[in-house]
Image (cartoon, rainbow, N blue to C red):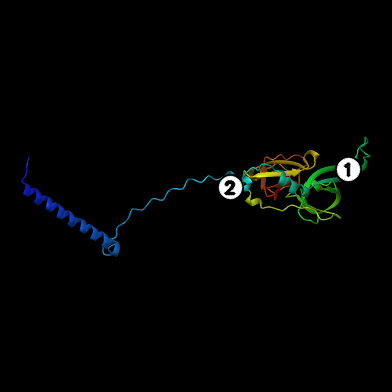
Amino acid sequence: MMAHPGFQLQRRDLLVRWGVVLLVCTLVSGCKARQDGPDPQAPPQAAPAAEAPKAPAAVVPAAQAGAEHPGYLRPASFADLVKRSNPAVVNIYTKVIRRERGRSLDPFFPGAPRDRISESLGTGFLIDASGVIVTNHHVVDHAAEIRVRTVDDKEYDAIVVGTDARTDIAVIELKDAPPQPFLELGDSDKVEVGEWVVAIGNALGLSSTVTAGIISAKGRSDVPLSGEVRYADFLQTDASINPGNSGGPLLNMAGEVIGINS
């Protein structure tokens, strides 16, 4: 369809003029915005908060997971702990003299009394460089002679400093001994069930025997010990405790004594 030429020219001229006006207005507005900055009277616009990227979950190594309770973690080896602690654990040999009535076939003339000598073996541990040793009461009870052998195969005489049958604890001291290695005492109240422990002693007469286990329970009172024992707050462990271990130390992973094996 053909249109009138004059009308086409007029319409095209109007479009060009409006286009120029719009272009000028846009340029002026942009320049003013750059010069004056944002309008202070304009209401504040709340920009949406950008969500912070979530950090990946940290993987805690097993060695750090139990840092607060190192006793819970089984070490790769107990060798270093034993090397540090073993020199302070000693063997205790005692001789007990018991007076007995002699045998006689005549009921009116009893036999002459005689002395019977028995020997016993136990364990103890040094708690002071001067030679002070802690052991069980029943290890040195009624002992006429006490001999102590250290890890380096040196022997010393010892005397009883104090003993208590109700707690089955005794303290003895070496005579004429040079400065000795000793163990630090720990806090048994802080021990938790499941912590690793090490026992060192004269198990079955074999010196420097080491066994390891965990604390199985605390506060045991139903323990079938001697009728003299009245102390009823024992730590139970699955570390092997055999005859001869009596009086030896039960150690935590820091090498501290937290119990006396009975």
State the residue in front, 24 or 211: 24
Judge whether residue 262 can be spotted in this image.
Answer: no
Q: Is residue 162 left or right of residue 31?
A: right
State the residue in front, 256 or 13: 13
The single residue placed furthest to the front in the displayed view is 5
Please count the marks in the image.
2
Residue type at numbered disc 2? Gln
Q: Which residue is drawn at 7% across and 49% down?
A: 7
Question: Disc 1 or 2, which lies upstream in sequence?
Answer: 2
Q: In which quarter of the image is the C terminus?
A: top right
Question: Can you give x and y, in whole percent of width and height, for residue 203 in the image?
Answer: 77, 40
| Marks 1 and 2 close (CB-CB < 8 Å) | no
Residue type at numbered disc 1? Ile
State the residue in front, 141 or 203: 203
Question: Can you give x and y, in whole percent of width and height, for residue 257 in the image?
Answer: 71, 50
Q: Is residue 191 left or right of residue 125?
A: left
Q: Residue at x 14, y 52 (%)?
A: 15
Q: In which quarter of the image is residue 114?
A: top right
Judge whether residue 140 can be spotted in this image.
Answer: yes
Q: Is residue 158 left or right of residue 195?
A: right
Disc 1: which residue: 117
Closer to us: mark 1 or mark 2?
Answer: 2
Cα gap from disc 1 to disc 2, whole angstroms = 56 Å
Disc 2 packing (10 Å; few <14; some 14–19; many ≥20): few
Disc 2: which residue: 64
Q: Which residue is drawn at 83% across and 43% down?
A: 120
* Element assignment for label 2: helix
Disc 1 packing (10 Å; few <14; some 14–19; many ≥20): few
* Element assignment for label 1: strand
